[in-house]
Structure formats: C-alpha cells, structure tokens
Amino acid sequence: MSLQDLLSVVGSVLIALGGGAVVVFALSKWLGGVWAGRILENERARETREQELLVRRRNAYAKLAVALRVFLRHEGQGWDQGQQVESGKFHEAYNEAALWAPDDVMNAVGSFLDLIKKIQDDPESVPQSMLLDTYANCISSMRRDCGFPATIPIQSCSLLIHLNAFIGGMLSEQ
C-alpha cells in the first residue's frame, strides 16, 4: 500500500465520519427545534389558561364584593323589595365565585355568611365591627388569590369603616 493509497483511505474515512457528524448534527438540531416548539406551545397554553382563570376570578370577585355589601347596608333591618333584588344579585355572584374561587376564599365568604345568619336570628348578636372585620377578611382573601400576596388586612385600615358610613349615608338620602 502506497502513501497515496493510505491518504486516500484515511481521507475517505474522515469524510464519511464528517458527513455522518453533519447528518447527526442536522437531525439533532431539527429534533431540538421540534421539542422546543412543543414545550413553548404547552407553556403558552398553560399561561393562557391561567390568565383566563385569573380574569374569571377577578370578575367573580368584583361582583361578589359588591354583592356582599347588601348585608352590610341592611344589617338589622327588614328585607324590602329592593333588598330582595340585591339579594338575587348576591346569589348570582356567589354561585359564580363558587365555581372559580379556591377554598380559602369560599371559607372566608362562608364565615361572613355565618355571621349574617346570626344577625337574622338576633340582630344584636354580632357587633358591626366583627361583621366589618369578616367582610374585610373576604376582600383580603380575594385580593391574595388575584395576585396580591402581600395584601395587608383591610381591617387595619379605616377604609372599610368609611365605606360603610358612605353607603349608609347614601341609603338614608334615598
């Protein structure tokens, strides 16, 4: 075997190996792109589902927060025709929240409703401050679920007391 034959054989082997490496590299790049595309598509779908769930929860919570105020406004009073309509809005908002809210939010709402039942049985059994604190706990749990984990308890603010006074003032003007 001559030197030229040896170089020809070595060159052919290197070309064959190099060509195989190019094929392997091309196939792995293609397969990596397919996997990356699938992973990205799954992540986008998951993010879209989470965003839709968050939007639904926020809408349900907005309705529920407003509807819960019907119980703050009319504490200790009889239920007239207008309050029955607002009560219907509450039931609609509660049903929607029950579908989308996690257990901690629904437990907070349940605690508030337990106080309302006590008030209906005996209007003097629950102080207004306890009712406001429980309402504030409902609002805080809704806010935490909507992406505000550092929500301070609203009962530490005077906002809720002013809100209730404002609503009461609006009702007395009517």
Image (cartoon, grey):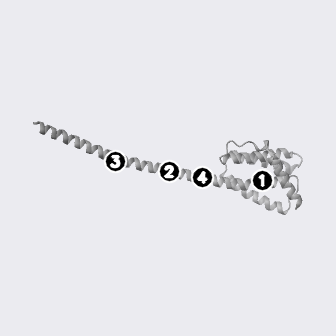
In percent of the image, x 83 and y 60: which residue is there? Answer: 83
In percent of the image, x 85 and y 47: which residue is there? Answer: 128
> What is the C-alpha distance between the residues marked 4 and 3?
36 Å
Residue tagged 4: 51
Which is in the foreground here, disc 2 or disc 3? Answer: 3
Q: Which mark is residue 56?
A: none
The amino acid type, in three-letter code, at marker 2 is: Asn
Residue tagged 3: 27
The amino acid type, in three-letter code, at marker 1 is: Leu
User: Which element is circle 3 on?
Assistant: helix
Task: List x then y, in percent, for residue 133.
Answer: 80, 44
Among numbered discs 4 and 3, the one appearing first in the sequence: 3
User: Which element is circle 4 on?
Assistant: helix
Q: Quadrant of residue 15?
A: top left
Nearer to the camera, 24 or 73: 24
In percent of the image, x 84 and y 54: which residue is there? Answer: 166
Which is in the foreground here, disc 3 or disc 1? Answer: 3
Quick one: label 3, few (<14), some, or many (20+) residues within 10 Å?
few
**Which quadrant does the C terminus fall into?**
bottom right
Quick one: label 1, few (<14), some, or many (20+) residues within 10 Å?
many
> What is the C-alpha distance between the residues marked 3 and 1?
61 Å
Among numbered discs 3 and 1, the one appearing first in the sequence: 3
Cβ atoms under marks 1 and 4 closer than 8 Å: no
Instruction: Using residue 21 as the reference point, say whether residue 157 is left or right of it.
Output: right
Residue tagged 1: 68
**Which quadrant does the N terminus fall into?**
top left
Nearer to the camera, 151 or 73: 151
Residue tagged 2: 42
Among numbered discs 1 and 4, the one appearing first in the sequence: 4
Instruction: Using residue 29 as the reference point, say whether residue 162 is left or right of it.
Output: right
User: Which element is circle 1 on?
Assistant: helix
Among numbered discs 1 and 2, the one appearing first in the sequence: 2
